[in-house]
Image (spheres, rainbow, N blue to C red):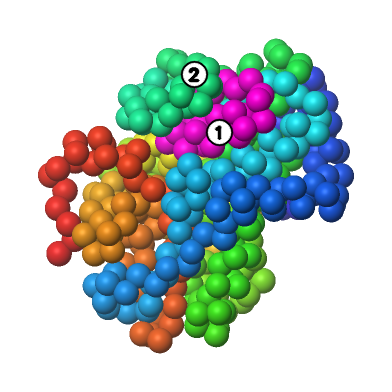
Amino acid sequence: MNYGEFGGQYVPQELKRKLNEIEKEFNKLSKDESFNKEYLYYLKQYIGRPSPLYFAENLTKYAGGAKIYLKREDLNYTGAHKINNAIGQVLLAKRMNKTHIIAETGAGQHGVATATVCSLFNIKCTIFMGAQDIKRQRVNVEKMKLLGADIVEVTRGKGTLKEAVDEAFEYLVKNKEIFYLIGSCVGPSPYPEMVKYFQKIIGEETKKQILEQETKLPKAIIACVGGGSNSIGLFTDFLKEKNVDIYGVEGAGKGVKTGKHASAIHNNKVGILHGMKTYTMQDEQGNIQDAYSISAGLDYPGIGPEHAYLNSIGRVKYDSITDEEAVNAFKLLCKLEGIIPALESSHAIAYAIKIAKKYKKEDAIIVNLSGRGDKDIDTILKESSYECIK
């Protein structure tokens, strides 16, 4: 895949050989009818796809602009979009005769999805997770343990998603027989391409569903962006539609001017992170800086290389939402629609409310509700000072 100057394999030679082996097998299987048939079988019969596209009538009235639709990835089995990719990659690992799968996780949804599919196919599973994320995503940690996964607590650095990815890659280099099941569209090639392939079902379904309900394409689509798996899944099938505005929403944390945020694109510096060339958060010396977001899934100091490319050519507008705005949107969706969204998804909800009045009332805009929010209840309870949007 050509991402312009972005992407690539900036890794040791031994790891490059492993990646090339995975890429060769992936390229072969992605064109294999029996492999894709098996993948689609599990999407439908195990995950419960297609996920609904829901018209949020109450939220629409509140925002006072375009019709707001929610792509309900929170209703997938395990509660998020992550299972789409986990099923695809575990089937690939199985075809490659791998007996041990590792994964990183921040918000815990990818960890739960990986533990789930490893349990389904009786494959050993090890999950790397930062110490801070283990504390704030306690429920998902217990789910992974119940599913039989071994949890490796990563205590170095800030103890969040970046450090979990660091540790997983180091383990991958040292152990030949394992398969690293990356959860986001980050890392060296072919991982961004693989994750995109297994997540593009989101946008394919969404386009079909909105045409059935509205008989026309949406005016805009919106998704949150950490590494960027749910967003690239939604965006891919719409990129060629010139009249559809596309928005990616990063975590502004305490505010992008405070330095306590997770907006790599706002930082506007290109560097090498986890074997890929992309926008990263850096200090003046070019060292990777810590990211910050109330949302564990957005707390990452970089962005997927295709997102970097789409930003560079201006096809997607990337913006950011603060912690306070996201928490307000979380509470608002609970109150208005009876839906408890993930804090990651709440960033996209908040942005949809902001831009709804840019469009006509007969227009539709779509938000990818990437996951459910039961995992975030402890965090929300600590943020009781935030009131619902007035």
Does 125 lie within the magenta span? yes
What residue is disc 1 on?
116
In this rendering, position of residue 160 left or right of residue 234: left
- Image height of 140 relative to 341, above or below: above
Which of the 4 quarters of the picture holds residue 359? Answer: bottom left
- Image height of 262 relative to 285, above or below: below
Residue type pointed to by label 1: Thr
Q: Is residue 59 in view from this perspective?
A: yes
Secondary element type, mark 1: helix
Residue type pointed to by label 2: Ile
Which residue is at 55% across, 33% downward?
116
Find the magenta span and give its range.
104-129
Secondary element type, mark 2: strand
The crowd level at tag 1 (other Cα within 10 Å; few <14, some 14-19, many 20+) is many
Q: Residue 111 location, x and y as percent?
A: 51, 31
Q: Is residue 270 in view from this perspective?
A: no
In this rendering, position of residue 325 left or right of residue 342: left
Which residue is at 34% across, 45% downward?
373
**Viewer-proximal residue among 343 and 355:** 343
Q: Residue 177 location, x and y as percent?
A: 76, 18
For the C terminus, which image quadrant?
bottom left
- Image height of 264 relative to 53, above or below: above
User: Label 2, label 1: how many angstroms apart (C-alpha)?
Assistant: 14 Å
**Viewer-proximal residue among 200 and 274:** 200
Q: Residue 144 location, x and y as percent?
A: 47, 27
Closer to the N terminus: mark 2 or mark 1?
A: 1
Cβ–Cβ under 8 Å for marks 2 and 1: no
Specify the label residue 164 is tagged with.
none
Query: What is the residue that sits farthest to the front in this orientation?
Result: 45
Specify the label residue 151 is tagged with.
2
Q: Residue 309 location, x and y as percent?
A: 63, 54
